[in-house]
Amino acid sequence: MHYALGDYVLDITQNAIEAGAGRVRVELAESDEAVSVVVSDDGIGMTEEELARALDPFYTDGKKHARRKVGLGLPFLVQATRQAGGSFRIESRKGEGTTVAFSFPTGNVDSPPLGDIPELFRAILCFPGGHEMEIRRTRTSSRGDLAYELARSELAEALGGLERADSLALLRDFIVSQEED
Amino acid sequence: MAKMTLDQLRKLREEKKQDLTRREVEGKEIQVIVGMGTCGIAAGAKQTFDEIVKAVEEYGLGKDVIIRQTGCMGLCYVEPTVEVVMPGMPTVIYGKMTADAAKELVRKHLVEKTLLENHIFDRPAVDIVKK
């Protein structure tokens, strides 16, 4: 299931970017008990009515995909958290942004729960657009403790841009090094 | 690998400039792409990558070949995997590419322009591959 977990993180992050966010923050916390993800953005946000619809699998506002008649990202995530005994929470204010938080019990997901972390973070950091992207990764578990933050602007400055293949190779090395205990 | 700071990352970028030119795309027509997902790395893809870089230099192909990394190609059971894209040759995904096999790959595919038998796992038509 770890590929699916990473896909959920990417999916929610993409939603945040498509909501016109100037800044997106992804927090991934891992312990022996749970894997928790919080994605917050300062995008256009939703009214209560829009928020209720966002969880309806057979509704989409049609803005992103003209011919698509379903919006399955959030409903699939809600369903997966329920089935795995996890939790899901979404908060949004019109004009201020949205926060999506979800968690899965560590015992009910594969190990490593988030799959290929360097690849996941590379994908998150390289979403197209001029937004700032921040990642906070923590792990407090019997596998060892970790805590670090990545900011897209700082990494882009240090690497002279994130678009080039050589920058991406160094970015991967950098993330791998941060994964050391 | 010890934890790196942003300053060390900047320094590394400078130090690796020569390495980086190897990965320049412009003017290069041959691509060698190494699968470096978790499965590939666990199977030794880093050694494979290093061996390809070394062999490409030894054969003086640096100016024609771009060596890249990618994620999992979906052939985890035959990792490490290497895809070769080269004009005049079928695009091939090779599997079980140990460091020794990687050296042989550079010689056979890039220099002699023949396929490396027994390591082909995807892409070329069946009638190209000798049994």
Image (spheres, coloured by chain):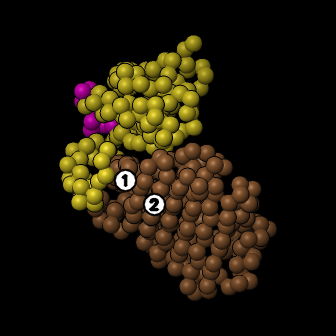
Chain colours: A brown, B yellow
Counting residues from the start of the chain, the first of labels 2 and 1 encountered is 2
Residue A13 x/y as whole percent: 55, 66
Magenta stretch holds residue B60: yes
Residue A112 falls inside the magenta stretch: no
Residue labelled with disc 1: A178
What residue is pinned by disc 2? A137
Q: Is residue B80 above or below residue A170?
A: above
- Residue type highlighted by circle 2: Arg
Decide: few, some or many residues near mark 2? Use Cα within 10 Å; few <14, some 14-19, many ≥20: many
Residue A58 percent across, percent down from the top left: 79, 68
- Looking at the image, can residue B105 be seen? no
B97 relative to A71 in the view: left or right: left
Left or right: A156, with A17 as reference point: left
Q: Mark 1 lies on which chain?
A: A
Q: Nearer the viewer, residue B89 or B105?
A: B105
Residue type marked 1:
Gln
Residue bounds of the magenta highlight: B58-65
Q: Residues within 10 Å of mark 1 (few under 14, many from 20)?
A: many
* Residue at image location 25% in from the left, 31% down from the top: B57
Determine whether label 2 and label 1 are within 8 Å by CB. yes
